[in-house]
Amino acid sequence: MTSFKNLNLNPKILTALENKGYNTPTPIQLQAIPHLLAGKDILGIAQTGTGKTAAFSLPILHNLFNSNISVKSGNVRALILTPTRELASQIAENIEAYGKDLNLRYAVIYGGVSEKPQVMALQRGIDILIATPGRLMDLMNQGYIRLMQLEILVLDEADRMLDMGFINDIKKITSRIPEKRQTLFFSATMPATITDLANSILKDPIRIEVTPQSTTVDRIDQKINFVENIDKPKLLRSILKQKDATSVLVFCRTKHGADRIEESLERNGFSVAAIHGDKTQGAREKALVNFRDGKIQVLVATDIAARGIDIPAITHVINYDIPSDPESYVHRIGRTARAGRQGVAISFCDPHDNKLLQAVEKVINFKIPVDNSHPFSKKSAKLDLRKDHKNNNRETHLNNNKEPEILNMNKNNKRPQHNKKQDQNFKQTTQSKKKGGIFSFIISLFKGKKTAVAPTKANPHKKAEPHNKVRPQNKERRHEVEVEAKTTRTRPERSTERKPRPTGGTRKISSGNSEKK
């Protein structure tokens, strides 16, 4: 079995790995490190939890230490771009641990905190800079960062940076760096846009694919729990009460949803914290430290905030909401079953999430098994619409949209016969028609009387129908009644007497009692 000693790494790096208990490289480390030490470009397709960070950080430390080039003020020798603050902090911790005896300067910059400490660190020159694209562009535009001495560029979690809208920033950054460089491109998934980006910045790369793209780790026990949305909080609490659920990461779509779950679990006595974009950096780091140290059982997070969570002890990942982006499912459940451990991934699916679930299964090419052992399985047994229920659903939908008159037809497709009361109403209506004419008949309709529709002159052979029966609109029939009403309506006679036309107001004359108009 190959060990790190066989990879020709610096002895100081090997000592640091031994102190952390790392002796055997993972598959991606075993394949990537020799090529990176040789200065070649790498296209790595690997999921989270595969040792990807060490795969690029170890050879970067080795090469920078061996070249021993002094860095000018504001310049950077190696740039590592990451999508989130958490992932940037995680990479910085690993680099600090692996290169503590190499005397290399490193810094991490991201948004949400003051720029002053970051600017002060950059003034001395940096060997390794870990940054998020947004803050990096801000400091570059202000003239605090210069990339003329850049030797190595790393894009980590490239697919997530694309999803977060950093594609234009990445293109601007790559346009300002030297063409002669080593580029490392890592992504868990490879959609077409990511492939185009990789082709534009890589030169004859070595492709390393540890697992097929968009597939999930075999060590994760994946389950689907069909449940109504109103029962999700109760189902979540029942899972958290299980003995093996010691470190649980809960994903939801929105920041408000994360806060709501946190408050609900706190009221029920669970130790919980939430992280999302509206939380301060200090609050997020505190929550991560407490979760890593086992002080809290549950961490609730959104997709963006959870990137960079590298905690091997996570036992369960719960998708409180099915992700809108199917690719995010791979990243979510990859937070468990790390470092060779087993893990459980449970996804809650309500009636509105069936299409999202089908999209996820299409991406991972795996039909997630249904768990029917949870407390609400009987209540939600009909929520699984993944099977061939399309025809049945279509027939039900059509039946619901049919008019009541059509649904009440008998087997011979004939209208039901009128009862005696309807016949009596019809006779009364015809008599009232003879007495008052069609105009009085229309007036009775507007008053809301439940009378049958009498035959009209335009259509004397039409059968009578009860007015209180719901029937489809008939534009021709309505038009005939309106025309008939106009022809039979009589106008009031005009008076032949002419009224005097007023010419103005009146005023009194002081000399007499008469009025002059």
Image (cartoon, rainbow, N blue to C red):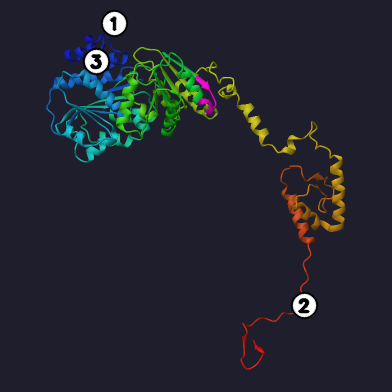
Residue depth check, mark 2 versus mark 1: number of the one nearer the observer: 2
The type of residue carrying mark 1 is Met
Secondary structure of residue under mark 2? loop
Separation (CA) of disc 2 from disc 1: 120 Å
- Measuring from the top left, give residue 199's x and y in whole percent: 31, 28
Separation (CA) of disc 2 from disc 3: 114 Å
Residue 84 visible in the picture: no
Q: Farthest residue toward the bottom? A: 511
Report which quarter residue 74 is drawn in. top left
Which disc is residue 1 wearing? 1
Number of marks in the rendered image: 3
Q: Which residues are magenta?
A: 224-232
Separation (CA) of disc 1 from disc 3: 16 Å
Q: Is residue 223 magenta?
A: no
- Measuring from the top left, give residue 107's x and y in whole percent: 21, 28
Secondary structure of residue under mark 1? loop
- Measuring from the top left, give residue 429's x and y in whole percent: 84, 50
Q: Nearer the viewer, residue 313 or 364?
A: 313
Residue matched to label 3: 34
Which disc is residue 496 wearing? 2
Q: Is residue 72 left or right of residue 410?
A: left
Q: Nearer the viewer, residue 14 or 69?
A: 14
How dense is the environment of label 2, judged by Cα within 10 Å: few (below 14), some, or many (20 and up)? few
